[in-house]
Image (cartoon, rainbow, N blue to C red):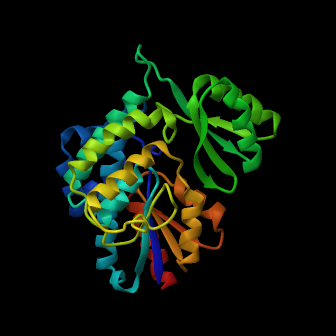
């Protein structure tokens, strides 16, 4: 049976994430122990305010996600169904793309992945601050008709930078930009019958505000010696195989460019889910904190099984559902 595995992005973090997996799976414990005491403390005991700071969020979610992935793989082997499942492709939402590339072997060491996303978090945090250290922008989710949302974006651009940042499902589009434009967007959206919900993030990800971070991120990624993925990974920026446009040469350089672009470009998540559907995937498993991507899968492809793994309970439920589907 064909399955897809997708990896959580920022915004779903919470105190205590990954703790029961750490306590029950040696494979998960190994990941957390490798990450170190500070990341463990943030994951297991961090307060909401600390966890939403980008430089904290990125390494904690990456670590928890990789621990959950290792626990899932161990459980599938233990239950004797790993060889009955074909992983068609992987994908990850924004930060989650680094988890997908780690699972695919492009980032060949967990410790390397933690270092990359930690530095990425710092760079993105810095890019989103003004000279006084205050957030220059933010993000909001538009819930409703996409054309109405994009019309509201056009109107709001009269007051500043605003872009469609995440195209998540047929009825959810996230926008990112500066504060004045976001304020105007909320008014314009309301007038068009669209609900606009401010997101609890510290800056305007996947927007032109991230250009300085993307340029500095190139240097971080160049050091990482990225490898060719052993499993197909659908890229955020193209909603297609991340290696599709690779025409030989340096794989690391190619992936560095793709990931640098990702920081300042929209995420075409709805298209990625449709890509899995077109491949004949029967179930998509979201791995990592929360179930935001699971909700988006249900909205985009209601007939596809949408499962998720973030703790012991959801891990056992997901494995049981897969056993019943095989």
Q: Where is residue 251 in the image (x, y as percent from the top left)?
A: 28, 62
Q: Where is residue 183 in the image (x, y as percent from the top left)?
A: 66, 25
Towards the viewer: 234 or 24: 234
Query: As drawn, is 243 to the left or to the right of 29?
Result: right
Residue at 62% x, 63% y is 298
Residue at 32% x, 33% y is 122
Residue at 73% x, 39% y is 195
Looking at the rendering, which quadrant does residue 235 occupy? bottom left
Query: As drawn, is 172 to the left or to the right of 90?
Result: right
Query: As drawn, is 217 to the left or to the right of 235?
Result: left
Towards the viewer: 194 or 151: 151
Residue 52 visible in the current orientation: no
Looking at the rendering, which quadrant does residue 78 occupy? bottom left
Q: Where is residue 279 in the image (x, y as percent from the top left)?
A: 53, 78
Q: Position of residue 214 (x, y in %)?
A: 38, 40
Residue at 54% x, 63% y is 272
């Amino acid at each position: 049976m064909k399955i897809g595995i997708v990896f959580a992005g920022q915004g779903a973090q919470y105190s205590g994430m990954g703790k029961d997996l750490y306590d029950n799976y040696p494979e998960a414990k190994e990941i957390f122990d490798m990450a170190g005491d500070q990341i463990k403390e943030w994951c297991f005991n961090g307060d909401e305010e600390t966890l939403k700071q980008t430089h904290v969020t990125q390494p904690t979610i990456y670590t928890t996600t990789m621990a959950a992935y290792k626990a899932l793989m161990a459980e599938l082997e233990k239950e004797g169904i790993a060889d009955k499942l074909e992983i068609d492709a992987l994908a990850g939402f924004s930060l989650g793309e680094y988890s997908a590339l780690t699972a695919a072997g492009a980032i060949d060491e967990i410790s390397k992945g933690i270092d990359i996303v930690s530095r990425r978090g710092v760079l993105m945090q810095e890019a989103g601050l003004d000279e006084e250290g205050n957030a220059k922008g933010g993000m909001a989710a538009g819930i409703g008709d996409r054309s109405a949302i994009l019309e509201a974006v056009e109107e709001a651009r009269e007051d500043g930078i605003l872009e469609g940042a995440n195209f998540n499902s047929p009825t959810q589009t996230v926008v990112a930009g500066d504060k004045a434009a976001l304020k105007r967007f909320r008014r314009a959206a309301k007038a068009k019958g669209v609900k606009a919900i401010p997101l609890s993030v510290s800056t305007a990800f996947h927007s032109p505000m991230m250009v300085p971070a993307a340029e500095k991120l190139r240097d971080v990624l160049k050091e990482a010696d990225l490898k060719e993925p052993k499993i197909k990974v659908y890229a955020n920026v193209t909603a297609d195989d991340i290696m599709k446009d690779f025409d030989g040469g340096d794989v690391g350089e190619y992936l560095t460019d793709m990931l640098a672009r990702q920081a300042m470009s929209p995420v075409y998540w709805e298209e990625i889910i449709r890509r899995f559907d077109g491949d004949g995937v029967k179930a998509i498993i979201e791995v990592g904190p929360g179930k935001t991507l699971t909700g988006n899968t249900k909205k985009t492809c209601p007939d596809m099984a949408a499962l998720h793994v973030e703790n012991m309970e959801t891990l056992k439920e997901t494995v049981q559902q897969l056993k019943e589907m095989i």
